[in-house]
Image (tube, rainbow, N blue to C red):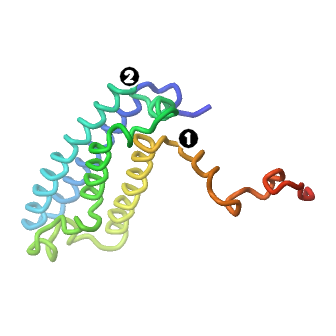
């Protein structure tokens, strides 16, 4: 039994978290009290809001197709076919938006060249800068999990591992090789 199995609107809670992360991003930029950081914050906030509009439309498409806003229902609806097959353009757009939001190559220059030296995180060093970078890496992990849940069948996608070569088999899978191993 999953902890979030009874939460019917899990995707709405995720959209609220996205909104809170944008608010945190704008507060970090505005508290640095530098005009270049404020300009960079406004540019970044407009950028994030425009990307979040696409994400919200994509989430509503997935909610309408699975008739639920629960992550567990997204996965159980993908037992016969994955959504990446049906919604291939939306899945590729989702990947591009995730690269844009996480500032990974080829979109790794979220700031202009004049703001690279004086961007939104210029006046932060030490633990605060570490928290900003750790939040970006946490965003990468969460984005990968969401892509897997929304388009690649979630945890049911691990059934694909059964067709891989035998060196991926577990050591206790005794009938795989035709003879039994001694138990430990």
Residue name at image x 44 percent, y 32 percent: 74
In the figure, 53 relative to 106: above or below? above
Please give left or right for residue 85 compared with residue 49 in the image.
right
On screen, 3 above or below 52? above
Residue 64 occupies quadrant: top left
Q: Are marks 1 and 2 in contact (CB under 8 Å)?
A: no
Quadrant placement of the N terminus = top right
Identify the secondary structure beneath mark 2. loop
Secondary element at image label 1: helix
Identify the residue shown where x is 13% and y is 65%. Answer: 37
Quadrant for the C terminus in the image: bottom right
Image coordinates of residue 178 in percent, x first then y, are 85, 54
- Quadrant of res 43: bottom left
Q: Position of residue 73 (x, y in %)?
A: 47, 29
| Location of mark 2 (residue) | 67
64 is higher (above) or lower (below) than 57: above
Category of crowding for the residue at label 1, using alpha-carbon neighbours closer than 10 angstroms: few (below 14), some (14–19), many (at least 20): some
Residue that appears at 53% across and 29% down:
5
In the picture of the structure, the residue carrying the numbered disc 1 is 156
Q: Position of residue 139 (x, y in %)?
A: 36, 55
């Amino acid at each position: 039994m999953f902890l979030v199995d009874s939460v019917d609107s899990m995707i709405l809670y995720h959209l609220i978290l996205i909104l809170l992360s944008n608010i945190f991003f704008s507060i970090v930029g505005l508290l640095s009290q530098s005009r270049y950081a404020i300009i960079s914050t406004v540019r970044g906030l407009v950028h994030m809001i425009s990307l979040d509009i696409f994400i919200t439309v994509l989430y509503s498409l997935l909610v309408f197709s699975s008739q639920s806003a629960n992550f567990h229902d997204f996965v159980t609806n993908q037992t016969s076919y994955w959504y990446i097959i049906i919604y291939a353009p939306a899945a590729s757009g989702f990947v591009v938006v995730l690269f844009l939001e996480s500032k990974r190559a080829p979109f790794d220059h979220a700031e202009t060249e004049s703001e690279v030296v004086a961007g939104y995180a210029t006046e932060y060093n030490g633990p605060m800068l570490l928290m900003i970078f750790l939040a970006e890496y946490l965003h990468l992990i969460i984005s990968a999990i969401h892509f897997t849940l929304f388009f690649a069948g979630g945890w049911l996608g691990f059934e694909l591992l059964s067709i891989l070569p035998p060196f991926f088999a577990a050591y206790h899978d005794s009938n795989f090789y035709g003879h039994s191993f001694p138990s430990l």
